[in-house]
Every structure is written in structure tokens, then in C-alpha cells.
Image: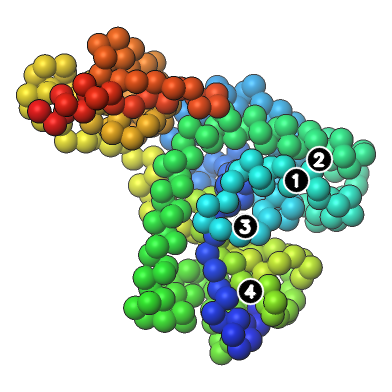
Amino acid sequence: MIEYELAGADLGEVRFAISPINELALSLRTWRDPGRYPLHLRWLQLTEDARRDLDTEMILALTNRDLWTPDFLTPRPFSPLTSFTDQLDALGDVPASVLREDVAEVHPDPATRPDVLTGRPARVLGRIQRALADYWATCFEPWWPRMQTILEADVVHRGRTIARSGITAMFADLSPTRIKLVGNVLQVHMSSDAHFRRSTAGEGLTLVPTLFTRNASAPISPDEPPVVMYGARGVGTLWEAERPETPDALVGLIGAARSRLLVLLESPASSTELAVRLGVTTTAVNQHLRALHAGGLLTSARHGRSVLYLRSGLGDRLVAG
């Protein structure tokens, strides 16, 4: 069990933050044991082809059979607006001693430790950064706006709970079986053997919602900043297909499928994201997007490795009319 002492004014220093790299690292659990994460099976199916082209040797080495990941891959975020690029760049500054210790926690037996995690620290960290950058670009970035929406909604909900019922009620709702506030001590019951008690004085406590955990957890080292990760609300709706309401006249003019796309593209989205939201193939979506774009109803712009589509002025007038 891990215990954080929230002394005096520190009760007011509890903050919420969202961590893109935290989500990326914890999602690796679904590779190891997809049956334990049935809510994400749809996403795993959609990214199956893309994952084949990744550095799977390194990516799989970043977890073990118990689904642990190195603590340096889940750094404390400082804001709900944390940037993935900033977090990825910061991995290059991880001290060699921290890299060795965290890898040894995940793979304690040197005889079975993956070769890709041994050798010069700078080389290992460089390969980790490249592997995670490719993973993010192909399997996360198209869906990140949707994931981020769920995470931000959870933070708003927790803030309302604090305002309405107090901080004790908020902690009780994070994980009834794992988290408990006793006086000014927050207890986090862990599945590992980690046990320590430390104060949050001068650092505060950061609460991080995540889409890829079944239970609340915290860093297993007392040297790490005070952080608690917990399961976000609404994960069950993450990969549900959307059926937006479309005007009958619009459906009669351009068809049901293209009408739904035009309604959804009030805000920018990629073809991959739209396919997930509508529960259809990316190929089918691309066919309709090309037709709508050729007809002047959509605009498009490249964003990283994705092409984002948005309703044009003509498209806005057609939907409104």
C-alpha cells in the first residue's frame, strides 16, 4: 500500500492533469492481454495493420507479463493540456540510473531482460522515443481528440464532485476498492508489493485519469512525484459508432452516409477518426469524403501524417438549409 500525507494547505494543492504519453504507455497492456481490455478490442482491430509496421520488439519490451510499465514512461503531467511532443522530448533527459532502475523493476531477471533495453542508455532512450513516436502517429493521433474528450469530461466531473460534496467524496468515487482518504492520508492499495509513506509537501498531488487501467495505481518508487492514476468515466462509450441526426432533405439530396459525414464535419476530423465514430471502414469513408470534397462541400488540410476534413462555407449552408 502507498500512502500520501496531504498535510495542511496541501489539501488545496490536489490538481488534475492529462498525460498523452501516459495513455500511450498504458495502452501497451492491451497488446499483451487484449482479453482483459474488451472495451478496446474495436480499436485494436482498427490498428492491427498499422501495428505490424512498428518496432514491436521494443514496444513489447516496455511491459511484462504482469502488465507493468517503467515509471519513466508515466511521468507526472502538470496540466490538462500537456503536449505529447513535449513529453516525448523529455524522455531523452531521463537519467541513466533511472532508466536502469525502472527497467530492472519491470524485468528483474537479467537473464530474461530484453536485449533492446540493455546497452548505452542514450541509444536505448533514442530507440524508445522513435518507437513511441511512430506508435503515436499511426495508432493514437487519429483518435486522440476523441480520447481527450473523455478524459477532459472526467476531470470536469471530478471538479463538480468536489464543489458539490467535498474532496473526500471525490476520492471515494475514484476507486472504491483501491483509494481511501483517512484523515489527511490518501491510501492507494496496489497489486504490487510496493509499500511506502511520504508527504506531498512542496509537490502537491496530481490525479491523472486514464482510459487504459482497470484499477487505480501510483508510482512504485517513493522517489517519484506524488501521482495517482485512475480509470476515467465513460470509457465504454469511447469506440461506440455515432449516428448523428441528419435532415431528411439533406439525406434525399446526397444520401444518408454523406449526410452523416457532413453533419459530423462541423469540426475537423481525419478519415480514420470518422470511420471509428461511424463504425464503418476507412475505405468507405474516403470514397464519400472525396466526393464531398470534389463537390465543394468540404475543405482539407494536412496535419502531421493525417489529412483533416472540415465543412466548407457551402457545406455549412447546405446543412443549415
**Is 261 drawn above or below residue 132 in the view shown?**
above
Element class at badge 4: loop
In three-dimensional space, the C-alpha distance between marks 2 and 1, rounded to whole angstroms, equals: 7 Å
**Mark 2 vs mark 3, CA separation in Å:** 19 Å
Query: Residue 239 versus residue 270: which sits nearer the camera?
Result: 270
Whichever of labels 2 and 1 marks the residue nearer the N terminus, that label is 1
Residue wearing tag 2: 125
Residue type at the position of mark 3:
Pro
* Mark 2 vs mark 3: in front: 3
Residue 140 lies, in percent from the top left, at: 54, 36
User: Which residue is under mark 4?
Assistant: 204
Residues packed near mark 2 inside 10 Å, few (<14), some (14 to 19) or many (20 plus) = some
Amino acid on which disc 1 is placed: Leu
Q: Secondary structure at mark 2?
A: helix
Residue that numbered label 3 is attached to: 77
- Look at the numbered discs 2 and 1 and tell me whether their residues touch, using CB distance below 8 Å: yes
Left or right: 217, with 156 as reference point? right
Q: Residue pushed farthest front?
A: 313
Amino acid on which the number 4 mark rests in the picture = Gly
Q: Secondary structure at mark 1?
A: helix
What is the count of numbered marks? 4
**Residue 28: x, y in percent?**
62, 42
Question: Is residue 69 positioned above or below 310 on the image?
Answer: below
Height in image: 150 above or below 115?
A: below
Q: Is residue 181 left or right of residue 173?
A: right
Q: Nearer the viewer, residue 158 or 280?
A: 158
Q: Find residue 91 and name its label.
A: 1
Residue 113 appears in the figure: yes
Q: State yes or no: discs 4 and 2 in contact (Cβ < 8 Å).
A: no
